[in-house]
Amino acid sequence: AYGPEHWVTSNVDCGRTQQSPIDIVDHQAHVGEEYQEIHLVGFDNESSNKTWMKNTGKT
């Protein structure tokens, strides 16, 4: 099960005021150099199977 209503099953604290199962403190967070760029391979090739990708902000 996905979504905030189910996070409490992963961690009891997630059913209260701290909803996210991951506590990311913005001013302390940093992205490692190995994660700076995403390289997609094969997306420049034409295909008969038309596919698209949409960033929904979810993982």
Image (cartoon, grey):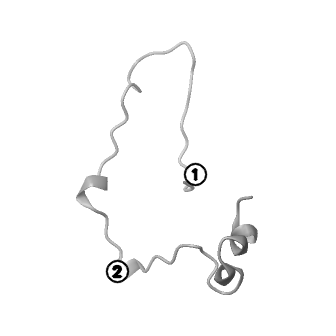
How far across and down, in percent of the image, does residue 4 sit?
70, 69
Please, what is the three-letter code of the amino acid marked with disc 1?
Thr
In the rendered view, tell whether residue 30 sits above or below residue 59. below
Residue 56 badge: 1
User: In the image, is 43 to the left or to the right of 6?
Assistant: left
Q: Is residue 29 left or right of residue 7?
A: left
Residue 52 x %, y %: 55, 32
Q: Position of residue 44 (x, y in %)?
A: 38, 23
At horizontal 58% and vertical 51% (from top left) the residue drawn is 56
Q: Position of residue 45 (x, y in %)?
A: 40, 18
In the displayed image of the protein, which residue is found farthest to the top?
48
Relative height, residue 29 to residue 57 (above, below): below
Q: In the figure, 27 relative to 30: above or below? A: below
Q: Which image quadrant is residue 1 in?
A: bottom right
Residue 15 is left or right of residue 24, and the answer is: right
Question: Could you tell me which residue is drawn at 71 percent across and 81 percent down?
Answer: 15
Q: Nearer the viewer, residue 57 or 9?
A: 9
Mark 2 burial class by Cα count in 10 Å: few <14, some 14-19, many 20+? few
Name the residue that disc number 2 marks: 28
**Residue 11 falls in image quadrant:** bottom right
Q: Amino acid at mark 2?
A: Gln
Residue in the image at 39% along x and 25% along y: 42
Q: Nearer the viewer, residue 46 or 17?
A: 17
Query: Of helix, strand and loop, which one carries label 2?
Result: helix
Q: Residue at x 66, y 79 (%)?
A: 14
Q: Residues within 10 Å of mark 1 (few under 14, many from 20)?
A: few
